[in-house]
Image (cartoon, rainbow, N blue to C red):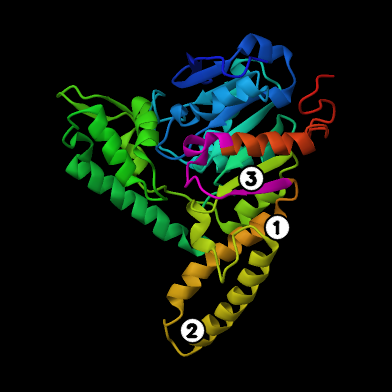
Amino acid sequence: MLRKGMSISAAEQRIAMPGGRRTLAARVWGSLEAAEKDCPGKRWIAIHGYLDNACTYDELAPRMVREGLATAVICIDMAGHGKSDFKEGYHAIDYVPDVIFAANSVNWDAFSLLAHSLGGGVAQCAAAAMPQRIARLVVIEALGWWSQESSAFPHTLATSVHATEARHRGDRSKSAPYASIEDCAQRRAKMNLVGALPLEAARILVSRGAKEDPRGGFMWASDPELLIPSRFRLDEGSVQAFVSAIRSPMLLVFAQDGLFRRFAMLGSKPFTARWCITVAGVYGLVCVAHSAAKLIGSKATDKIYGQMRPAFWFMVRWLRAGTSTTVMLREGGHHPHLVRPDDVLQAMVGWVGTKGKLMSSLGKDALLVKG
């Protein structure tokens, strides 16, 4: 373990995907050579959120190495993000094999996952689909992806196709460049739709998320096609199937002022027993009222029903995540690992302290102790 306070830096790496048609970029903290010989609990692949990049872990990953929680952390840029290659079409579930291929590239048969937001759904799907590969996972501000009713599939596809037509018709990818990296950071801090993002945190993300524009100035490094709504979203039954299939130990980290603050209800904080009772009761009443309104052709309850349904779904997911431990931070917004990295690290250390001696889903390697 590195001495506390010792400065470490990240190494850049490119990871070839099968077929050789594209590569992922990554920032690697720690030693890959040492990690190959270490236990799965100390080698991590980190997955960022939508329109973020590998720099989202620039505060947390080196702390993990210094604290001894990690021998190596491979922070990947998902396809179309950061410095990774673009590809044809993007769907969240397609990121899952990319994570597995990244582990294969460094000969990690088993490893741990650190993930945020969109990446959290990727990590949870990977753990559910390939439990023999995932020793444990830490998921920040995520519990599965946002789902939809099965009946909405045709509308979702139509919306995506129309958006694709509109984007290419207007050629929005050639919007005016930003004058400086600082202007990009200012914009990134303001454009965050899921909570406040401090300017300093935005600067970290933009250091990798923006690039020089051939016309002068700067432009976003991510693929403009990522802004097009997905052509396909999983229904709630599928998301719950993934969450309930996870067998690896999982730490869920949320912030009170983060993405899920919208689901706080009648004084109860999300992801607590009291909250579950409150959500179940209110949702039951709303469903009765909504059914009655539909019988008389009224849309008066449509809005409240639409607001309550996601809260109920996330409550059910949380109850079905049988291997999880939940930590709710007082603050940190949607990016607590970037804004409050010491708080997230403390949560991880506490979790390892109580769970570290448990056997992983692999059935042979302790999470932190070799042999």
**The C terminus: image quadrant:** top right
Q: Secondary structure at mark 3?
A: strand
Tell me the amino acid under the disc marked 3. Leu
> What is the crowding at mark 2: few (fewer than 14 residues within 10 Å), some, or many (at least 20)?
few
Q: CA distance from mark 3 to mark 1?
A: 13 Å
Confirm whether the magenta stretch covers residue 327.
yes
**Residue 175 disc label:** none
Viewer-proximal residue, 7 or 306? Answer: 7
**Residue 252 disc label:** 3
Q: Quadrant of residue 133?
A: top right
Q: Quadrant of residue 38?
A: top right
Tell me the amino acid under the disc marked 1. Leu
Q: Residue at x 47, y 69 (%)?
A: 306
Q: Give the image location of residue 339, x and y in percent.
A: 47, 38
Q: Nearer the viewer, mark 2 or mark 1?
A: 1
* Magenta part of the chain: 324-342
Q: Residue at x 75, y 20 (%)?
A: 39
Write down the residue under mark 1.
319
**Residue 294 disc label:** 2
Q: Residue furthest top?
A: 33
